[in-house]
Amino acid sequence: QVQLKESGPGLVQPSETLSLTCTVSGFSLTSYSVSWVRQPSGKGPEWMGRMWYDGDTAYNSALKSRLSISRDTSKNQVFLKMNSLQTDDTGTYYCTIHTNWGQGVMVTVSS
Amino acid sequence: DIQMTQSPSLLSASVGDRVTINCKASQNINKYLNWYQQKLGEAPKLLIYNTNNLQTGIPSRFSGSGSGTDYTLTISSLQPEDFGTYFCFQHNSWPLTFGSGTKLEIK
């Protein structure tokens, strides 16, 4: 069955870089596009960017200068890297194909 | 960016009630509108895709309608398990955007 699972550090220092991994199963990354979505506690979700099935990427312009999404199809993984983190980057980060979502990973930006 | 304005932001209703949640886009989104339900501590769950298509496994009491800039999610007969926060989501234009959410409480 289709599954996505996020992994990465729960705590990141301000100004540091966040690195997250989305490991998928039950489908191929060359057939489905995977998006990253984040959600501050108590607020609505924000779409961050997408790894298209063909390897192309799309980013939210508000984050584009800090964000990079890549993949390793042999490992069924999609990666998110975002630099210059600040406290308002705190929240739960999800990977999703929109019909299915990972469980999310909580990221706190704090010193 | 397309702004998605949901209303109401808070809704309290009784079991058996018919409930509607509205979502207004700042420009035409050509029916590329999904509805999600989210419960505390859980990921969003897709209910309706592309305005009026019921996702597999979702009860038929959920339905969607709309066109252009105005969209509606309807729950025909509210059940206790329907509490949570509902979000609309447009995937017509970049960047993709979510509504601010409607918190549905069961009286």
Image: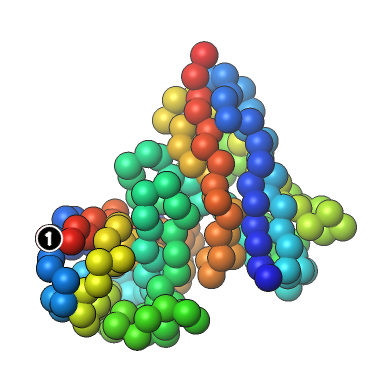
Local secondary structure at mark 1: loop
The answer to whether residue A102 is left or right of residue A56 is left
Mark 1 residue type: Lys
Q: Residue B41 at x, y = what percent?
A: 42, 47
The answer to whether residue B40 is left or right of residue A73 is left
Q: Residue at x 58, y 55 (%)?
A: A102
Q: Residue B47 at x, y = what percent?
A: 40, 73
Q: Residue A45 at x, y = what percent?
A: 41, 51
**Quarter of the rendering containing residue B23:** bottom left
Q: Residue A109 at x, y = what percent?
A: 50, 25
- State the residue position of label 1: B107
Compare residues A58 and A87 and report the one nearer the observer. Answer: A87
Subunit of label 1:
B
The answer to whether residue A30 is left or right of residue A96 is right
Q: Residue at x 73, y 63 (%)?
A: A25
Q: Quadrant of the C terminus of chain B?
A: bottom left
Q: Quadrant of the N terminus of chain B?
A: bottom left
Task: Give above or below for B19 relative to A73.
Answer: below
Task: Give above or below for B9 relative to A20.
Answer: below
On the question of residue B81 being in view, the answer is yes
On the question of residue B102 being in view, the answer is no
Q: Residue at x 42, y 30 (%)?
A: A88
Q: Residue at x 23, y 56 (%)?
A: B103
